Image: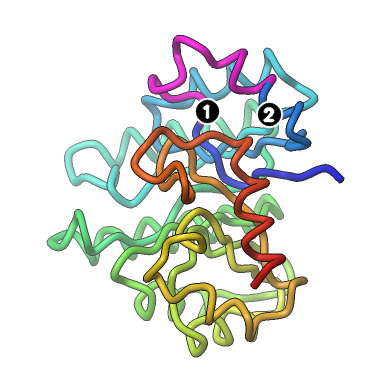
């Protein structure tokens, strides 16, 4: 059996000293495809370099993370994004979305940039990878409004309830990205997952963040997809 880690930031500095070993360990664990979501223009180069080094395993996305949506830099970030879409091949637009945990004061600008990136995804016929934190209702309203036959994607790091999950499934071409939180003792996510069909779920790690139990608090790695899959299977 082989696995896909649908969301892993292996290009970040947390892996700079042992990235080759990390990828080797993932492949040997059966995690052979590693999908790399971008953060902003500061991470594009390192992400693309890793993808070029491992073209059969690492697949890049391009996007502007909501925490990188700043008044003073968004114009240059959008120029970078559109230039990259013209010059390179990407698997998806991501990660994009809304974050009201870290960025409570910029909702209107986040909504504008999220909408623009979804429109780009429709134009280029690419799926979207959505980051949502404390803004699920605001985010899914935008997706519901723009949803069409050319739009698909995943709500990355899903931690919502059954009502939220069914709202995503109702979009028809969208999935729930499930990671290490599923293994956390008091998350309650395992109970929600019991009600969700397997064909609506994608596995992810969000490495280097959110390592599953028993590695919680340590650096996450793509090889831990296996731990998440085991928890889901036992659920």
Q: Position of residue 191 (x, y in %)?
A: 53, 81
Does the stretch in magenta take in 16?
Answer: yes
Residue 42 to residue 162: above or below: above
> What residue is disc 1 on?
10
State which tag comes first along the sequence, 1 or 2: 1
Q: Position of residue 165 (x, y in %)?
A: 55, 81
Q: Which quadrant holds residue 41?
A: top left
Q: Which quadrant holds residue 25?
A: top right
Q: Which residues are drawn in magenta?
A: 10-24
Label 2 neighbour load within 10 Å: few <14, some 14-19, many 20+: many
- Magenta: main secondary structure equals helix
Q: Residue at x 74, y 72 (%)?
A: 198
Q: Position of residue 109 (x, y in %)?
A: 25, 59
Q: Residue at x 47, y 37 (%)?
A: 220
> What residue is disc 2 on?
58
Q: Quadrant of the N terminus?
A: top right
Q: Quadrant of the C terminus?
A: bottom right
Residue 2 to residue 104: above or below: above
Q: Are marks 1 and 2 in contact (CB under 8 Å)?
A: yes
Going by the picture, which residue comes out furthest to the bottom?
163
């Amino acid at each position: 059996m082989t696995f896909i880690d649908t969301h892993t930031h292996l290009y970040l500095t947390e892996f700079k000293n042992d990235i080759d070993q990390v990828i080797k360990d993932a492949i040997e664990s059966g995690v052979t495809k590693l999908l790399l979501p971008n953060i902003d223009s500061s991470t594009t180069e390192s992400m693309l370099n890793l993808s070029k080094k491992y073209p059969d395993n690492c697949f890049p996305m391009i996007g502007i993370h909501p925490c990188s949506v700043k008044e003073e830099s968004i114009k240059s970030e959008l120029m970078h994004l559109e230039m990259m879409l013209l010059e390179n091949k990407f698997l998806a637009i991501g990660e994009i979305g809304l974050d009201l945990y870290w960025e409570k004061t910029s909702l209107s600008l986040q909504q504008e940039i999220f909408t623009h990136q979804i429109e780009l995804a429709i134009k280029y016929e690419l799926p979207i990878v959505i980051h949502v934190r404390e803004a699920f209702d605001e985010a899914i309203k935008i997706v519901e409004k723009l949803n069409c036959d050319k739009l698909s994607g995943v709500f990355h790091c899903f931690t919502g309830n059954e009502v939220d999950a069914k709202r995503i499934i109702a979009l028809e071409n969208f999935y729930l990205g499930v990671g290490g939180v599923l293994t956390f003792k008091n998350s309650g996510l395992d109970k929600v997952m019991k009600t969700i069909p397997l064909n609506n779920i994608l596995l992810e790690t969000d490495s280097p963040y959110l390592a599953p139990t028993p590695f919680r608090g340590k650096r996450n790695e793509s090889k831990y997809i296996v731990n998440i899959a085991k928890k889901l299977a036992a659920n």
